[in-house]
Image: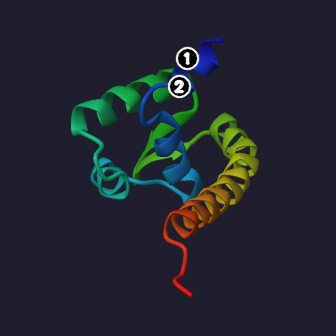
Amino acid sequence: MAAMDLFGRRWALRILWELRAGPLGARALLAHCEGLSSSVLYQRLRELTSSGIIAPSVDGYELTRLGAALSHALQPLDEWAIIWAQAQAQAQAQEQDDQNPAEA
C-alpha cells in the first residue's frame, strides 16, 4: 500500500510520466506540468528519490531501473486513458445532439 500512497499523491504519476523519455530538470518539469507549483514539485522529487524511483542526474532527474519498470507498467494505463477520453467525447457529443435536435 505504500506504493499506492506515493503514486496517489498529486502530480507523482505525472512527474514519472514526463521522465519516461529521459532526464529533465526542475524547470522543464514545471513547464511540462502546467499548474504544478515548485514547492509540490520539490516535495514529490524528494519522495520519488527517497523511494528509489528517480535519481538526480547531470541533466536533472531521471528514472532509475525501478522507475523505468514502473514506466512500462503505466503504458497500458495511458492506452486505456485514450480510449476513455474518446468515449467521454463521444458521450458528450451525443448528449449535445440529444439536447439540440436538428430542426426538420
Q: Left or right of 70: which side holds 14?
A: left
Q: Picture coordinates of residue 15 (x, y %)?
A: 46, 43
Vertical placement of residue 103 versus 95, above or below: below
Tag 1–tag 2 contact (CB < 8 Å): yes
Q: Which residue is the site of mark 1?
A: 5
The quadrant holding residue 90 is bottom right
**Dot 1 crowding, Cα within 10 Å, few <14, some 14–19, many 20+:** few
Residue at image position (48%, 21%) is: 50
Seen in the picture, residue 5 relative to 40 is either above or below; the reply is above
- Secondary structure under the numbered disc 2 in the rendered image: loop
Query: Where residue 8 is drawn, which disc sits there?
Result: 2
Q: Position of residue 24 (x, y in %)?
A: 41, 54
Q: Residue at x 58, y 63 (%)?
A: 89
Residue 64's tag is none
* Extreme residue toward the bottom, this view: 104
* Amino acid tagged 2: Gly
Screen quadrant of the N terminus: top right
Camera-nearest residue between 36 and 39: 36
* Horizontal relation, residue 91 to residue 14: left or right: right
Near-viewer residue (6 or 46):
6
Q: Position of residue 100 (x, y in %)?
A: 49, 70
Which secondary structure lies at badge 1? helix
Quadrant of image for the C terminus: bottom right
Q: Quadrant of residue 93?
A: bottom right
Callout 1, which amino acid?
Answer: Asp
Q: Residue furthest front?
A: 104
Nearer to the camera, 9 or 20: 9
Where is residue 87? Give x, y as percent.
67, 59
**Quarter of the figure with residue 3:** top right
